Image: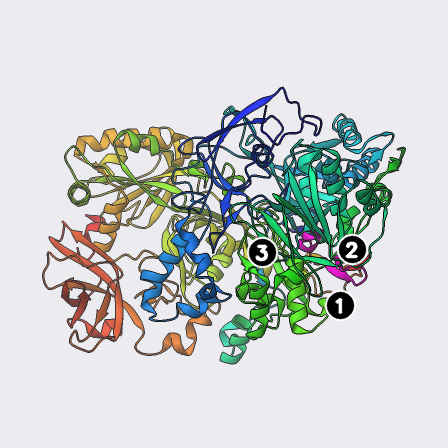
Amino acid sequence: MSGAFRIPSAGRLSQAKTARFSFDGQSYAGIEGDTLASALLANGVHLVGRSFKYHRPRGILSAGAEEPNALVEIKRDAARKTPNVRATVQELYDGLAAQSQNRWPSLSFDVGAVNDMASPFFSAGFYYKTFMWPKAAWKSLYEPKIRAAAGLGVSPDQPDPDHYSSRYAHCDVLVLGGGAAGIAAALAAAETGVRVILADEQAEFGGSLRFESGARIDGQDGFAWAQGAVAKLAAMDNVRVLSRTTAFGYYAQNFVGLVERVSDHLKAPGHELPRERLWQVRAKRVVLASGAIERHMVFADNDRPGIMLAGAARTYLNHYGVAVGKNVGVYTANDSAYAAAIDLKKAGVNVAAIVDLRDNPTGPVIDEARALGIEVNFGRAVIRAGGKLRVSSMTVQPKNGGGERTIPVDAILMSAGWTPSVHLFSQSRGKVAFNDETKRFVPGIYAQDCVSVGACNGTDGLSASLDEAYAAGAKAAKDAGAKTARGMKPKVDASESWSRGMLGAAPGAGSDTTVKAFVDFQNDVTAKDIRQAVHEGMRSIEHVKRFTTNGMATDQGKTSNMHGLAIAAETLGKPIPEVGLTTFRAPYTPVTFGAIVSHARGPLFDPTRRTAIHPWAEAQGAVFEDVGQWKRAWYFPKAGEDMHAAVDRECVAVRKTAGLFDASTLGKIEVVGPDAAKFMELLYTNPWEKLEPGRCRYGIMLREDGFIYDDGVVGRLAPDRFHVTTTTGGAPRVMNHMEDYLQTEFPHLNVWLTSITEQWAVIAVQGPKSRDIIAPLVEGIDMSDEALPHMSVREGKICGVPTRLFRMSFTGERGFEVNVPADYGQAVWEALWAEGQKHGAAAYGTEAMHVLRAEKGYIIVGQDTDGTVTPNDAGLDWAVGKKKADFVGIRGMARPDLVAKGRKQLVGLKTKDPKVVLEEGAQIVEDPKQAIPMKMIGHVTSSYWSQNCGRSIALALVAGGRGRMGDTLYVPMPNGVIEVEVTGMVFFDETGGRLNG
Amino acid sequence: MLLIRCPYCEEERPELEFRNAGEAHIARSANIAGESDDDFEKFFFIRSNPKGIIHERWRHMHGCARFFNAVRDTVTDKFIMTYKAGEPKPSKLPEISNEVVAK
């Protein structure tokens, strides 16, 4: 037997398929097809959690996605702990282990419940008002304590071992919601042959047909019809049917996000299955069939376990075969709760009384309830519930006051009416309209190509819903391009119909400040809190919402929004539409980060770029650093060397013999065409027209505002062909910048731009022995200083493969950069390495490269410049063509502030103590004795230990720096002030003789 | 995710393929070096920030890589039309169903 409250004659589950599960360590039996909630209820367990703020005992309110209370932790193993799972959504599997949340030491005795007694201090806006002073205590004391005391589940503390998948899909008609209306719309659309996707969040299609025992369609029970219709749809080639799939977000132009729960319901999901699958669907037409959500009644202590929505109780009975109590009371303001009472009574459950707030309602369900011998009371209210861990009674009073009567019950079924689920419609930017007669917000003005059908459109009755949905499905298909329709509209033989109801607080919500009549269960917001918010000056519903947090929990106010709005409107003395509804936002229900991130995590988060020479560097034991998406060899430690020792050795080797450096990541762009030189003139500050083919020049690129954007050496291969290099990180934006000007400002220029970064591997060979290393491998290029002087480029062959051989230097030594097709990169590197070994050359990494260039005062754009540095600031005026009439940045550079005195200029710094290495980013002051905050006149941009100089060296941006040569400045640090001397930027070989040495 | 029509590819493609490139129809002066401070300020710094119709530049970055112009409504986020770089600002906008419709 799967629980004492299971009624064998009721429900659709097969009693034979038992599933064992545990809750808070206690073992129970359920049935396959149960949700965790239905299985717990079958075992008489109503108490499943503690509330967010007051730690009040909470039970199961609903039977679906709107559940605010029954949030539990599901634990598969140490890494698979999912907090805040709605027990009403989680399907049972054999071995499922669930834990209650937000309680200590146990669910039935929770110390935090002291908050409930202290609740007068915890009213609306409490946090804002109480923890104002002292300010410093917020971070150290208040916030950590509040966060520990409030909150729901505990986040997992290990990486998520599951995997998730992601798919894009296109369709003609996307139907969201697989109840009667959604199925009818999908049938109508599918029969025309267009591509249809039908999605529903439940494991089984049918929506409210799960509990509507009176519905008959096409001669069958409603639920059975739904299963047959969906099976028919699933068999069609043009239809995709997705169960356990929630449409969580409706974005621009009919782009809808769905998340499919693929394996959370399985006992032992194989690793071949993703846990969830994200569907990003673009639909020509969308049919919204999201149904309606029942509202609770707002009365004192309406949150006691055992008090639930009438429709939910009916679902537990008619679908799961579970009675939610043995002696239930009903409190309602509409007809639908009568149907629940009737079904329970017929199943043998005692219905103690129906309390109806309405004065003289009439209808067949009321007559039927009376005929079954159920006590029916009109014009009365339940003013409070008794019991604590489980409801024990309901106290009834005429709604205009009078004698009280307490009726013992073990469950209360309540219904204030049904709220059309307009969440997705609202997310699509549609505007809702208030129907004053039915007191409902329904879709009003559409913003996208979608249509609402059935209960979410405020359409009452199965027959009307099916008619509307079928017509809408057919129209959507036609609008999406369907030619023919040849279907048969489903025929409704019998149905139930109910609407109306009430909004806001019932008499039992009290005006007494100690009464807790909950509006929002998940955020513990009471009717009193909302009234108080209005009394304290909140006028806009958006302010009321934020002040009270009504509707701001993870359930997004599915049950609470309308009540909250009605109470605010009543307190403000305004009609509901004037107060207005808050905006619904995605996601409809919480979505895991896993589903959104999908495969884009770990190594797949961002592409990793490796050079052709990467495997060699890896084999040599190089340590790599990330530069943008690139992996670059940082240094090559030998046995026993730390980074410092390795870099020192590499730096010395380059200046003593030679070093090999993988410069392949440098951005490279080929600028080709009859107007190539003209284009270069416009994009760079330098003059290019007179640069002879075969020669190179250091180029500076500015933005239009006059600040340095990028730099690099440019070789002219032919009159109409330039080989441009850019910084490693700047390559894509430089290409974009060039394309932008070429396409939009200078389209008259006949030029083509091609990114060649990945086509050429680049091996820098630098040092006095560099030519000796390269020369034996080169064919067809005269390597003499006369034929190949510094800053020149030749095309020829190396190791038998084509090369663009640059004579250039970023170290200050005689140097070459060997460009070879990337496929030959590693082979040529290995050949050069073998030659280098004969001369004692070393491989060096990016750290040594940085030190070597800083020894020579060569800047790195983005390190020594920060987007506010002009060529003049950087001491690069020589690279600006003085006779040029135009180039990008020419006007910006002349702005008054950019030519003003006292600008920060790039200079060298030497610490008075040569052993002290400054920290990059450290601030510089003139007088270290001045009061704090000191006047900062600049900062250190580059700083290294230079083994070649035998001391530390640094570059810095200092206000009026070039006028301070020889001055002493100060760098205040936490451990004391460092004295520095302002110097020129060149620390090694000031005359530059070594370039030809 | 928006769908944007590339006037060169003549196809609607998802927003992921495009990159916004700022306001359109701001021409760089042929004699920019001779511009006054005020004119340069207008050219380089001042941008309109309309509620409603905006003319802006986009680049079909991960497609044909061309820059083009678009007319977009900043309230509805809808693209009203796109046209090639260098074409004049459209004097009349097409009457598409940009307004939300009552059903």
Residue A987 visible: no
- State the image coordinates of residue A236 (x, y, percent, origin top left): 77, 27
Placement of the N terminus of chain A among the 4 image quadrants: top right
Observer-side mark, 1 or 3, equals 3
What is the spatial separation of the Cα atoms under label 2 and label 1, in whole angstroms? 52 Å
- Asked where in the image residue A195 lies, by quadrant, the reply is top right
Crowding near the residue tagged with mark 3, few <14, some 14–19, many ≥20 C-alpha atoms within 10 Å:
many
Q: Tag 3: residue type?
A: Asp
Q: Is residue A947 left or right of residue A522?
A: left
Q: What stretch is highlighted in magenta?
A: A419-443
**Do the numbered discs 2 and 1 sit on residues whose CB atoms are within 8 Å?**
no
Q: Height in image: A893 above or below A862? A: below
User: What residue is pinned by disc 3?
Assistant: A520
Q: Which of the pair A144/A906 is nearer the observer?
A: A144
Q: Height in image: A476 above or below A521? A: above
User: What residue is pinned by disc 2?
Assistant: A500
Q: Mark 1 lies on which chain?
A: B
Judged from the image, the secondary structure of the residue bearing numbered disc 2 is loop
Q: Which chain carries label 2?
A: A
User: What residue is pinned by disc 1?
Assistant: B91
